[in-house]
Protein backbone atom coordinates (compact mmCIF):
# COMPACT_ATOMS: atom_id res chain seq x y z
CA UNK A 1 0.00 0.00 0.00
CA UNK A 2 1.40 3.33 -0.93
CA UNK A 3 0.19 6.63 0.49
CA UNK A 4 -1.24 8.98 -2.05
CA UNK A 5 0.36 12.38 -2.39
CA UNK A 6 -1.93 15.32 -2.00
CA UNK A 7 -0.65 18.68 -3.12
CA UNK A 8 -1.94 21.55 -1.08
CA UNK A 9 -1.41 25.19 -1.94
CA UNK A 10 0.78 27.23 0.40
CA UNK A 11 -1.08 28.76 3.28
CA UNK A 12 -2.38 32.24 2.60
CA UNK A 13 0.30 34.47 4.03
CA UNK A 14 -0.48 37.55 2.00
CA UNK A 15 2.65 36.93 -0.02
CA UNK A 16 5.67 34.73 -0.11
CA UNK A 17 9.25 35.87 -0.42
CA UNK A 18 10.53 33.12 -2.57
CA UNK A 19 9.15 30.70 -5.06
CA UNK A 20 11.72 28.21 -3.82
CA UNK A 21 9.33 26.33 -1.58
CA UNK A 22 6.59 25.92 -4.11
CA UNK A 23 3.43 24.07 -3.18
CA UNK A 24 3.76 22.01 -0.07
CA UNK A 25 3.50 18.32 -0.70
CA UNK A 26 2.08 16.27 2.07
CA UNK A 27 1.78 12.52 2.18
CA UNK A 28 -1.53 11.30 3.43
CA UNK A 29 -2.81 7.80 3.77
CA UNK A 30 -5.97 7.18 1.72
CA UNK A 31 -9.12 8.04 3.57
CA UNK A 32 -7.60 10.69 5.82
CA UNK A 33 -9.35 14.03 5.45
CA UNK A 34 -6.65 16.57 4.46
CA UNK A 35 -7.55 19.27 6.98
CA UNK A 36 -8.08 16.97 9.93
CA UNK A 37 -4.96 15.00 9.09
CA UNK A 38 -2.84 18.11 8.99
CA UNK A 39 -4.24 19.43 12.23
CA UNK A 40 -3.70 16.11 13.91
CA UNK A 41 -0.12 15.95 12.63
CA UNK A 42 0.53 19.42 14.04
CA UNK A 43 -1.08 18.51 17.35
CA UNK A 44 1.07 15.42 17.67
CA UNK A 45 4.23 17.45 16.90
CA UNK A 46 3.38 19.85 19.72
CA UNK A 47 2.64 16.92 22.00
CA UNK A 48 5.90 15.15 21.27
CA UNK A 49 7.91 18.39 21.52
CA UNK A 50 6.28 19.07 24.89
CA UNK A 51 7.21 15.56 26.01
CA UNK A 52 10.80 15.88 24.82
CA UNK A 53 11.04 19.33 26.48
CA UNK A 54 9.80 17.89 29.78
CA UNK A 55 12.39 15.10 29.63
CA UNK A 56 15.17 17.60 28.83
CA UNK A 57 14.03 19.84 31.68
CA UNK A 58 14.15 16.88 34.08
CA UNK A 59 17.62 16.00 32.80
CA UNK A 60 18.83 19.57 33.46
CA UNK A 61 17.30 19.58 36.94
CA UNK A 62 18.64 16.11 37.71
CA UNK A 63 22.21 16.85 36.59
CA UNK A 64 22.31 20.18 38.45
CA UNK A 65 20.94 18.56 41.62
CA UNK A 66 23.44 15.69 41.38
CA UNK A 67 26.22 18.23 40.79
CA UNK A 68 25.26 20.25 43.86
CA UNK A 69 25.12 17.08 45.97
CA UNK A 70 28.63 16.15 44.78
CA UNK A 71 29.98 19.63 45.54
CA UNK A 72 28.43 19.48 49.02
CA UNK A 73 30.28 16.22 49.57
CA UNK A 74 33.41 18.05 48.44
CA UNK A 75 33.71 16.21 45.14
CA UNK A 76 34.23 19.54 43.47
CA UNK A 77 35.44 18.26 40.10
CA UNK A 78 32.68 15.67 39.63
CA UNK A 79 30.12 18.23 40.78
CA UNK A 80 31.19 20.91 38.31
CA UNK A 81 31.41 18.33 35.54
CA UNK A 82 27.83 17.18 36.19
CA UNK A 83 26.57 20.77 36.13
CA UNK A 84 28.56 21.29 32.93
CA UNK A 85 26.79 18.35 31.28
CA UNK A 86 23.46 19.90 32.24
CA UNK A 87 24.20 22.47 29.54
CA UNK A 88 23.65 19.83 26.84
CA UNK A 89 19.94 19.20 27.57
CA UNK A 90 19.53 22.90 28.42
CA UNK A 91 20.77 24.01 25.01
CA UNK A 92 18.60 21.42 23.23
CA UNK A 93 15.57 22.53 25.23
CA UNK A 94 16.02 26.26 24.66
CA UNK A 95 17.35 25.93 21.13
CA UNK A 96 15.20 23.26 19.51
CA UNK A 97 12.32 21.76 21.45
CA UNK A 98 10.54 24.25 23.73
CA UNK A 99 7.17 24.99 22.06
CA UNK A 100 6.66 28.77 21.82
CA UNK A 101 4.74 31.05 19.49
CA UNK A 102 6.76 32.28 16.52
CA UNK A 103 6.08 36.04 17.11
CA UNK A 104 7.72 37.20 13.87
CA UNK A 105 5.86 40.30 12.70
CA UNK A 106 3.99 39.55 9.51
CA UNK A 107 3.30 41.97 6.70
CA UNK A 108 -0.07 42.75 8.28
CA UNK A 109 1.86 43.98 11.37
CA UNK A 110 0.52 41.16 13.51
CA UNK A 111 2.81 38.77 15.35
CA UNK A 112 2.86 35.28 13.86
CA UNK A 113 0.94 32.88 16.06
CA UNK A 114 2.29 29.63 14.67
CA UNK A 115 4.16 27.19 16.87
CA UNK A 116 7.92 27.32 16.78
CA UNK A 117 10.19 24.92 18.59
CA UNK A 118 12.98 26.45 20.63
CA UNK A 119 13.69 30.13 21.13
CA UNK A 120 16.26 30.45 18.34
CA UNK A 121 14.21 29.87 15.21
CA UNK A 122 10.80 30.94 13.96
CA UNK A 123 8.03 28.74 12.60
CA UNK A 124 8.48 26.72 9.42
CA UNK A 125 5.18 27.66 7.79
CA UNK A 126 5.73 31.42 7.47
CA UNK A 127 8.08 32.22 4.58
CA UNK A 128 11.38 33.46 5.97
CA UNK A 129 10.30 33.16 9.62
CA UNK A 130 12.58 30.24 10.49
CA UNK A 131 15.89 31.76 9.41
CA UNK A 132 14.74 35.38 9.78
CA UNK A 133 14.22 35.01 13.52
CA UNK A 134 17.63 33.39 13.89
CA UNK A 135 19.29 36.31 12.10
CA UNK A 136 17.47 38.71 14.42
CA UNK A 137 18.83 36.69 17.33
CA UNK A 138 22.39 37.07 16.11
CA UNK A 139 21.80 40.74 15.38
CA UNK A 140 22.64 40.31 11.70
CA UNK A 141 21.11 43.30 9.93
CA UNK A 142 17.80 42.87 11.78
CA UNK A 143 17.21 39.69 9.85
CA UNK A 144 16.82 41.25 6.46
CA UNK A 145 15.57 38.72 4.02
CA UNK A 146 15.94 39.64 0.38
CA UNK A 147 12.94 38.52 -1.58
CA UNK A 148 13.95 36.32 -4.46
CA UNK A 149 12.39 37.21 -7.75
CA UNK A 150 9.74 34.74 -8.60
CA UNK A 151 9.92 32.63 -11.67
CA UNK A 152 7.93 34.05 -14.53
CA UNK A 153 4.73 32.14 -14.76
CA UNK A 154 3.10 31.47 -18.07
CA UNK A 155 -0.27 32.64 -16.89
CA UNK A 156 -0.40 36.37 -16.29
CA UNK A 157 -3.19 36.21 -13.74
CA UNK A 158 -1.50 33.94 -11.24
CA UNK A 159 1.81 35.79 -11.54
CA UNK A 160 0.12 39.03 -10.59
CA UNK A 161 -1.61 37.39 -7.65
CA UNK A 162 1.52 35.85 -6.26
CA UNK A 163 3.76 38.86 -6.60
CA UNK A 164 5.36 40.07 -3.39
CA UNK A 165 4.63 43.65 -2.33
CA UNK A 166 8.21 44.67 -3.01
CA UNK A 167 10.61 42.87 -5.25
CA UNK A 168 13.91 44.54 -4.62
CA UNK A 169 13.63 46.15 -1.20
CA UNK A 170 14.89 43.81 1.54
CA UNK A 171 12.16 42.89 3.98
CA UNK A 172 13.03 43.67 7.56
CA UNK A 173 12.20 40.90 9.97
CA UNK A 174 11.12 42.00 13.42
CA UNK A 175 10.15 39.83 16.33
CA UNK A 176 7.67 40.93 18.96
CA UNK A 177 8.52 39.29 22.25
CA UNK A 178 9.64 39.77 25.81
CA UNK A 179 13.12 39.84 27.30
CA UNK A 180 12.69 36.37 28.75
CA UNK A 181 12.67 34.85 25.26
CA UNK A 182 15.69 36.92 24.18
CA UNK A 183 17.73 35.99 27.26
CA UNK A 184 16.59 32.38 26.96
CA UNK A 185 17.71 32.23 23.34
CA UNK A 186 21.17 33.51 24.25
CA UNK A 187 21.45 31.11 27.19
CA UNK A 188 20.54 28.30 24.80
CA UNK A 189 23.06 29.42 22.18
CA UNK A 190 25.93 29.90 24.62
CA UNK A 191 25.28 26.66 26.50
CA UNK A 192 25.17 24.90 23.14
CA UNK A 193 28.62 26.24 22.23
CA UNK A 194 29.98 25.37 25.68
CA UNK A 195 28.56 21.83 25.43
CA UNK A 196 30.25 21.29 22.07
CA UNK A 197 33.60 22.48 23.48
CA UNK A 198 33.03 20.28 26.53
CA UNK A 199 32.28 17.25 24.37
CA UNK A 200 35.41 17.82 22.25
CA UNK A 201 37.58 18.13 25.39
CA UNK A 202 36.13 14.94 26.90
CA UNK A 203 36.71 13.03 23.64
CA UNK A 204 40.32 14.23 23.43
CA UNK A 205 41.03 13.23 27.01
ZN1 LIG B 1 5.97 32.47 11.93
Image: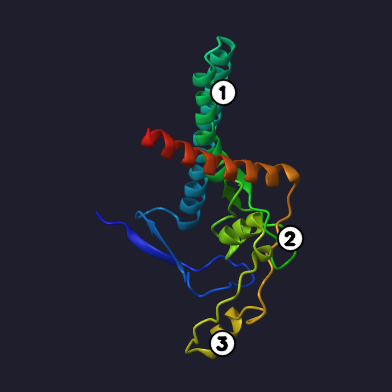
In the foreground, 73 or 117: 73
In the depicted view, which residue is nearer to us: 186 or 181? 186
Q: CA distance from mark 1 to mark 3?
A: 60 Å
- At which x and y percent is residue 120? 59, 50
Q: Nearer the viewer, mark 1 or mark 3?
A: 1
Q: Whole-percent x and y of residue 4?
A: 33, 60
Towards the viewer: 133 or 35: 133
- Can residue 46 be seen in the rendering of this structure? no
In the picture, measured across the screen, residue 104 lies left or right of residue 79, that is right
Residue position marked by numbered label 3 in the rendering:
157
Q: Is residue 109 above or below residue 195?
A: below
Q: Earlier in the sequence, mark 2 or mark 3?
A: 2
Q: Quadrant of the N terminus?
A: bottom left
Q: Residue at x 65, y 68 (%)?
A: 144
Give the residue number, with chain letter if any, for mark 2: 110
Q: Which residue is mark 1?
A: 64
Amino acid sequence: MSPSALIEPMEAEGFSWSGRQGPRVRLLTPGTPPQGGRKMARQSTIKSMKGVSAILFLAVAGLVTAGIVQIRHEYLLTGTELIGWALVPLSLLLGFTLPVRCRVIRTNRKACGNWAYGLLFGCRSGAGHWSGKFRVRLGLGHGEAKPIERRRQSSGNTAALNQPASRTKPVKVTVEENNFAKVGAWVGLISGIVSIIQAIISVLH
